[in-house]
Structures are given as C-alpha cells and as structure tokens.
C-alpha cells in the first residue's frame, strides 16, 4: 500500500475520532506555588528545598468535595505547612517520624500523584520515601513503639519549630485524640 494514501486516511480517521471524544477545551489548574509562599514556609522552619515543592495540585484535590477531603483553602494551607515541616523532620532525622492524621492524609494524596511524588522524593531524599501503614498494629509492643515514636516526633517538632505537634482543632480523632496516625515513614536515613 502506498504511504501517501495511508496518511490522508489516518488523518481522516483522527479527525473523525476527535469528534467522538473531543479534547477538553479548558483545563483547570491551580496557580503555581509562589516565591512569597516558599519564603513564608522557609521562615516557618521548613527546609528550603522542601518549601519549594509545588503541591498545589495536591491541595486542589484535597479541597475537592467528591474525590478529596472537602477541606477549605485554610485547611489545605495549614496541612501543607505541617506536611512540609514533617518532611523536614524526616530529612533531618530519618525514618520513624509519625505523622498526625492531617499530615498522613496530605501524604497519601501526594503519594497518589506517583510521578510527582517519585521526583519530589528523589530530589529531596535521594530516593523514594516509603510509607509503612502497619506500625502500631502488630501487637502490644508495636503499639508501645508507635507511642514512643510519636512522642519522639512531637519532641523533635517542638525543638525544630517551637510549636506543639498534636491534634488540630476540629480534626476527627480516628486513632487517638492526639491525632497521630498508625503510620510512620520507612525511608530516609536509618
């Protein structure tokens, strides 16, 4: 078959196919992370490299009523600060940092953006930051180890940021009312 006749046929097919499922004419993206926001996060003690991670798509998803958490803009901004502070602790101290419920939800959403998460981890930690969701669930001693790891995370948070890590006002308690989660990271420094 002649390639000259194949090209018009292919173009005709593609033109017809595009009418069946037209490409979106307008896609909504959040505004990119601003240099002012990066500076503000860094002033709050966030590692500058972590402050510069653009998580605006993650925040947009968390605000979504149907597919996200239905959080407000203020809630996502606060959760971003806490998540980036937690990542700062992970970068400084390695594995075993126990996130709060809000931080864990933000982390889950970041992980779900697989391509961005892999790139962000590689740039920030030099490799993938794994999530181990079973810490504290494997018996009495494991639960005690979770408690100790959370207390260590709280102490390091207080030392680094001169603020208390704990339950946020209005946050639902699903593990305990200190708002820690069952999970700890299993990546970074050993």
Image (tube, rainbow, N blue to C red):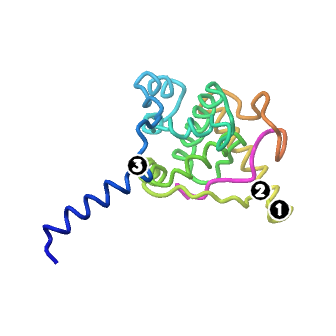
Residue 113, image x, y percentages: 51, 50
Q: Residues within 10 Å of mark 2 (few under 14, many from 20)?
A: some
Locate the C terminus by quadrant: bottom right
**Position of 52 relative to 123 (above/below):** above
The residue that label 3 is drawn on is: 123
Residue 150, image x, y percentages: 73, 46
Determine contact: label 1, label 2, CB under 8 Å. Answer: yes
Does the magenta run of residues contain 14? no
Quarter of the figure with residue 78: top right
Residue drawn at x 70%, y 39% as measured from the top left: 154
Q: Earlier in the sequence, mark 2 or mark 3?
A: 3
The residue that label 1 is drawn on is: 141
The residue that label 2 is drawn on is: 145
Determine contact: label 2, label 3, CB under 8 Å. Answer: no
Q: Which residues are magenta?
A: 178-190
Does the magenta run of residues contain 179? yes
Q: Secondary structure at mark 3?
A: helix
Q: Residues within 10 Å of mark 3 (few under 14, many from 20)?
A: some
Q: Secondary structure at mark 2?
A: helix
């Amino acid at each position: 078959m002649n390639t000259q006749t194949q090209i018009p046929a292919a173009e005709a097919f593609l033109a017809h196919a595009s009418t069946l499922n037209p490409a979106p004419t307008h896609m909504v993206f959040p505004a990119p992370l601003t240099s002012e926001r990066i500076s503000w996060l860094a002033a709050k003690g966030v590692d500058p490299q972590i402050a510069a991670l653009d998580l605006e798509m993650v925040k947009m998803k968390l605000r979504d009523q149907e597919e996200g958490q239905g959080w407000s803009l203020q809630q996502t901004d606060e959760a971003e600060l806490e998540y980036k502070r937690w990542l700062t602790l992970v970068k400084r101290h390695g594995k075993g940092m126990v996130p709060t419920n809000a931080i864990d939800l933000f982390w889950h959403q970041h992980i779900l953006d697989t391509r961005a998460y892999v790139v962000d981890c590689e740039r920030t930690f030099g490799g993938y930051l794994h999530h181990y969701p079973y810490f504290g669930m494997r018996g009495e001693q494991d639960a005690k180890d979770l408690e100790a790891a959370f207390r260590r995370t709280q102490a390091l948070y207080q030392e680094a940021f001169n603020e208390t890590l704990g339950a946020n006002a209005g946050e639902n308690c699903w593990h305990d009312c200190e708002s820690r989660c069952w999970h700890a990271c299993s990546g970074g420094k050993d």
